[in-house]
Amino acid sequence: MYIDSHSHWSDPRYTPEIVESLLKKSEELDISEFMLGGVDPLDWLRQLELKQMYPKSFHLCFGLHPYFVSKNTAVDCEIALDELVKIIDQAQALGETGLDFRDKILESGGLSHDEARAHQIDFFENQIELAKVYQKPLVLHIVQAHEKALQIFGMWGVPDKKGMVDAFNGSYETAIKYIDLGFMISVGGAVTFDKHQKLHQAVAQIPVDFLLLESDSPDQAPQNWKGLNDSSSLWQIAEKIGQLRGITAETALEISTKNFKKLFTL
């Protein structure tokens, strides 16, 4: 049985009926476990509800996503981190956290671009420290900000439990910098698009012990997918990765599942 390394089953677009249906669909495709991705305090509560209903299926991950940080004041983010500390022992990872320097994200909270970047950086650094204190792997969301994120790890260091870069869509040169720090590289639907040649080159070269596969559902669907993404798209992602590495889709999923269990000590 295989594991989806990063997904958002706690997204409100997944009604209870959809969750039940997709769990059956995934099970029929030998995908039986799912690491969730934390976004904000409400999302953490939904994750806890899913875990209570399906304790063997879901692994929890709590953090403040750059989207949430950008839209909220420093005071609100501090309050949210206080809540995070109260429940972090129930999670297997801390995240999503990171940096997203796209204009639409930077502008979502009414700050100047420089102020918004500084605001994201503050709460990224705060969560790195929490991961160190509570011995949790990090789940990183980094978009148009790899240079700054790597600079921060150079200054602050990396948590003992390392972590993963989710929805990676960069070059091999960028991937290897994270790998040198101990992070795994998680690849999703972007790899199925012909236009992402740099990503294809990276996936072909990433050391096998640092490769993860994810759906990032219900978004980030693979090429030609219809409707909301779901964890069954792992097979399409695995097929493409298999082509790039000269292995079968089954082998790609086996590699990812083995690496996931190593990272999250399952």
Image: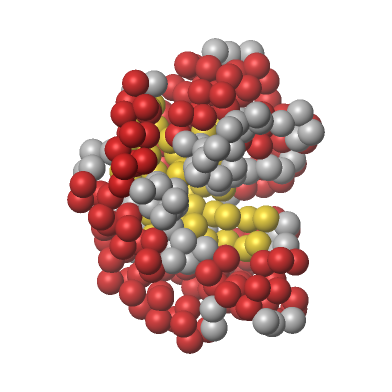
Taking 121 as reference, is 31 left or right? left
What is the x, y in percent for residue 144? 73, 57
Taking 1 as reference, is 125 left or right? right
The mark total stands at: 0
Q: Residue at x 45, y 44 (%)?
A: 7
Which of the pair 37/245 is nearer the observer?
37
The image quadrant of residue 145 is bottom right
* Coloring applied to the structure: secondary structure
What is the x, y in percent for residue 110? 67, 82
**In the rendered image of this protein, does residue 179 appear above or below residue 144?**
above
The image quadrant of residue 254 is top left
Taking 78 as reference, is 52 left or right? left
Determine if residue 187 is in view.
Answer: no
Q: Residue at x 61, y 24 (%)?
A: 241
The image quadrant of residue 200 is top right
What is the x, y in percent for residue 246? 63, 13
> Quadrant where the C terminus lies?
top left
Which of the pair 38/92 is nearer the observer?
38
Which of the pair 256/111 is nearer the observer?
111
Q: Residue at x 34, y 21 (%)?
A: 28
**In the rendered image of this protein, does residue 70 appear above or below residue 57?**
below
Farthest bottom residue in view: 75
What is the x, y in percent for residue 54? 23, 42
Determine if residue 181 is in view.
Answer: yes
> Quadrant where the N terminus lies?
top left
